Image (tube, rainbow, N blue to C red):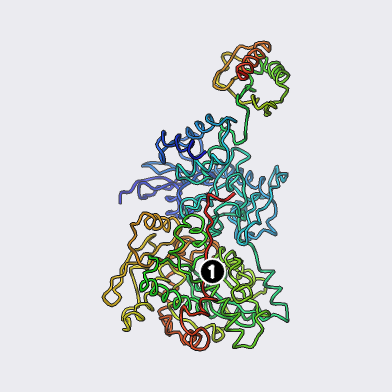
Amino acid sequence: MQAVVQEIVGQMGNEKAPLLQVLLAVQDASPRNYVSEEAVRAIARSMKVSRCRVYSTASFYTEISLKPRGRHLIRICGNAPCENAGRTAIMEAIQQELGIEAGETTADGLISLEKVSCLGSCYKSPAIKVDHQVYGNLTPEEAVAVIRSLREGGEQ
Amino acid sequence: MAMVEITINKRTISVPENITIMEAAKLNGISLPSLCNHPDQKVKANCRVCAVEVEGVKNLVASCSTKIAEGMKITTNSPRVRETVRTIVELILADHPQECLTCIRSGECELRQLAFKLGMKEVQGVKNTKRLPLDFSTPSLVRDPNKCIKCGRCAEVCHHVQEVGILYSHNRGLDIGVTPEYGKELKDVACVLCGQCVLACPVGAIYEKDETDKVWEALGDPDKHVVVQVAPSVRVSIAEEFGRPSGSIATSKLVSALRLLGFDRVFDTDFAADLTIMEEGHELLQRLQTGGVLPMITSCSPGWIKYIEHFYPELLPHVSSCKSPQQMFGAMAKSYYAKISGIDPKDIYVVSVMPCTAKKYEAARPEMRDSGYRDVDAVLTTRELGRMFKHEGIDFNSLEDGEFDLPLGISTGAAAIFGATGGVMEAALRTVYEVVTGQTLEKLEFEGVRGMEGVKASSVDLGGTEVKVAVAHGLAHAKQIMEAIAAGEADYTFIEVMCCPGGCIGGGGQPYGTTNAVREKRIQGLYEVDQKSEFRKSHENPAIQKLYADYLQAPLGPVSHKLLHTTYTNRCQHELQ
């Protein structure tokens, strides 16, 4: 872990590296899509800051998880525009397809489902975000299709 | 200094430019309230209770963080300001345990005082559903997260003054907590237990682990011979608990008050400080003569010891093997004193009064029982002792003067200044100079190691040999010296490190309201004690001379080695789970 972190921190300027970017990069490099306690320590060592500071920033942003998640992350917007455009039906379809509730991870560790405040994509509500890609103007069937293609891709 | 004209509450006044509204108001007789502001810290502006109106600005502004400008019209007393500030305080109180009657901070709580000052009559919407567990994990400190108002003062002192960095604000919104990472307990992180967070905290969210009940119990036990030792810096701070000005010297009243509490003997840690100088001074000479590890670093400050054990364990060979005065006293009380008084050491109960929370941890270290009994049985901070005096209704200021008991109450001015940054160094130099040169030191004051500067470097001529010394106080400054040693850039022979800013007089067990300004007054008090002392060099202490003649034989001898020296532990932070 120290080597992975050191490489990321080194590329971003060592002690002058921006902590938030480091955390995001470390999370991206994690197979379980999160920042582990070991990683928090490694970042603190590499950047010569206290573990507390690293944990503080990591715990502030919803974008960063301190708990293991699935390899893929599906975020569903819970705000009013998406709600009005049929978010509930999409959520139900996805939960049924995956067999998990929001905040949970599939048993195979492949997919985590999260409800978030806004994806900044109200113009194409209802929207979901799969990893770094936003899908909008969805019907429940289309949302399920996105999930299935993700699973097929994941099983390859 | 350029001045600008501003208006505060319709009164036009001239104030220095580039100061804050809060400072300008203060200069003109108005103390605006604040909970997050602290005179020794940078502005945080997160409590918002210092809000005021500025003409032309839509929202109220935080007066602690807003600079004045020419022509600014400020209102601190409008109904809008009053209502807003009361609402903010009410919101804080609604989220605060309503336990003021039994809170350890009760009488001195800044939040409670503010609520009183604002005439709060009721608190609406009190919610006491949240009950987070208290952290009792260390011998020194208790953390009560329920009382935390998230002002960030503890985190700042922990990160910037001490650079230990184990307390910080975590999470967001309602879930914010100021804790170690992952909400860990203090025993599971590299906390050095200095207690500077206690002094910084405006409320009762972190405080010393109270040992007064233990001491009451010992005092009430007819089979116990209870002796007390008092650290140098307590004599210049305890009177503050009874309304006297900072730095007031209260040695004699303190002795009388301790007798009234019922201690069988009232002794002085200063005696053991003189003993420390004898051992440490000779250890330094031995290292110089035998090519030992240099620079040698002092070992009196238990917060400092825990710090180096966590953060620089590879430098531990630099640390003197001498126990601190507190522990030397305990070891002597249960060996030498037991022998001369004919009391079985198992019946001797040693209480120490310290300016320090880390001393509680030090006394509990497993290696501190070389006489076969625990050196020190209970450690009270200055605050705890103040509470005991108040509990007994002791009218401290009007007591008759008392004197320490013999022989463990005899000490020198050199020991008294242990409590001030640079004091151990100065005391050691007075003795080492005379031992090495065989000549009488003409000027006892080593000005180069005195004062509040963070790192002080100086050099001393020891009969033709130039010895370079350094003094650091506050762990951020100690860290600078450690980095220099690690990089091979520190050519010092002897280094004094004190964990707390100002030295022990600024310790985490001292009365609330310990600011840097207060620290300087206490330091002056100690130098005055030294100035007025009959003996001012540790090796001239007649009780110490007799101790060596009758019992220890010689510094660094086998008895000393067994009872007065110790070992350290690698507590490297990277291995903490």
Residue B312 x/y as whole percent: 46, 56
Q: State the residue in front, B33 or A34.
A: A34
Q: How many marks?
A: 1
Q: State the residue in front, B34 or B560.
A: B560
Element type where label 1 sits in the image: helix
Is A69 above or below relative to A14?
Answer: above
Q: Is residue B401 visible?
A: no
Q: Pointer 1 indicates a residue of which chain?
A: B
Residue located 37% across and 56% down the image? B484
Q: Is residue B126 left or right of residue A19?
A: right
Amino acid at pointer 1:
Glu
Q: State the residue in front, B285 or B45.
A: B285
Is B487 above or below relative to B276?
Answer: above
Q: Quadrant of residue A146?
A: top right
Q: Is residue B147 left or right of residue B315?
A: right
Q: Is residue B67 left or right of residue B363?
A: left
* Extreme residue toward the left, this view: B464
Residue B267 x/y as whole percent: 56, 80
Residue located 55% across and 18% down the image? A133
Residue B293 x/y as whole percent: 40, 66
Residue located 61% across and 46% down the image? B89
Q: Which residue is mark 1?
A: B240
Is B286 above or below relative to A31?
Answer: below
Q: Quadrant of residue A15?
A: top left
Q: Is residue B373 visible?
A: yes
Q: Residues within 10 Å of mark 1 (few under 14, many from 20)?
A: many
Residue B30 x/y as whole percent: 48, 53
